């Protein structure tokens, strides 16, 4: 992509916070879907709205039994969140 096009795209994303945050929203949803599937009881209003707490079993995130594959997936997503500068 030509340098001018990249500069214009970067300026557009900075001026349009909703679009700049899209990767963070997507990563947040992907990470929390793993916890939802494993039975985590969400605490934040945002997560409860998105996933609900029906059938949840674990109040503490450290108590959620994740498989090695799910732990690796969460770790990968968290790395991506840090790379994108997503809020914790």
Image (cartoon, rainbow, N blue to C red):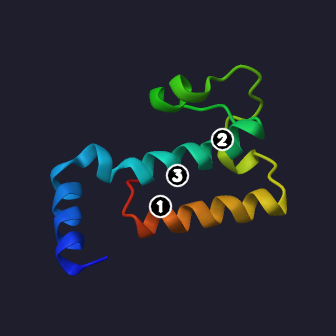
Q: Quadrant of the N terminus?
A: bottom left
N-terminal of the pair, mark 1 or mark 3, is 3
Q: Residue 81 carries which label?
A: 1
N-terminal of the pair, mark 2 or mark 1, is 2
- Left or right of 45? Residue 85 is left
Q: In which quarter of the image is the C terminus?
A: bottom left
Corner quadrant of residue 77: bottom right
Discs 1, 3 touching: Cβ within 8 Å: yes
- Left or right of 16? Residue 79 is right
Query: Which residue is label 3 attached to?
Result: 27
N-terminal of the pair, mark 2 or mark 3, is 3
Corner quadrant of residue 40: top right
- Left or right of 45? Residue 87 is left
Residue at left 75%, top 46%?
A: 63
Mark 2, secondary structure of its residue: helix
Q: How many C-alpha atoms fall within 10 Å of the one at disc 1: few (<14), some, or many (≥20)?
A: many
| Residue 47 position within the rendered picture, expressed as x and y whole percent measured from the top left | 53, 32
Query: Could you tell me how far apart the alpha carbons at marks 2 and 3 are, in whole angstroms?
Result: 10 Å
Query: Which residue is label 2 attached to?
Result: 33
| Residue 58 position within the rendered picture, expressed as x and y whole percent measured from the top left | 74, 35
């Amino acid at each position: 992509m030509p340098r001018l096009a990249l500069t214009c795209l970067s300026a557009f994303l900075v001026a349009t916070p909703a679009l700049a945050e899209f990767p963070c929203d997507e990563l947040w949803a992907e990470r929390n879907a793993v916890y939802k599937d494993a039975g985590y009881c969400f605490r934040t209003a945002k997560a409860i709205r998105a996933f609900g707490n029906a059938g949840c079993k674990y109040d503490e995130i450290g108590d959620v039994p994740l498989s090695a594959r799910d732990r690796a997936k969460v770790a990968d997503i968290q790395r991506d969140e840090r790379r994108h500068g997503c809020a914790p």
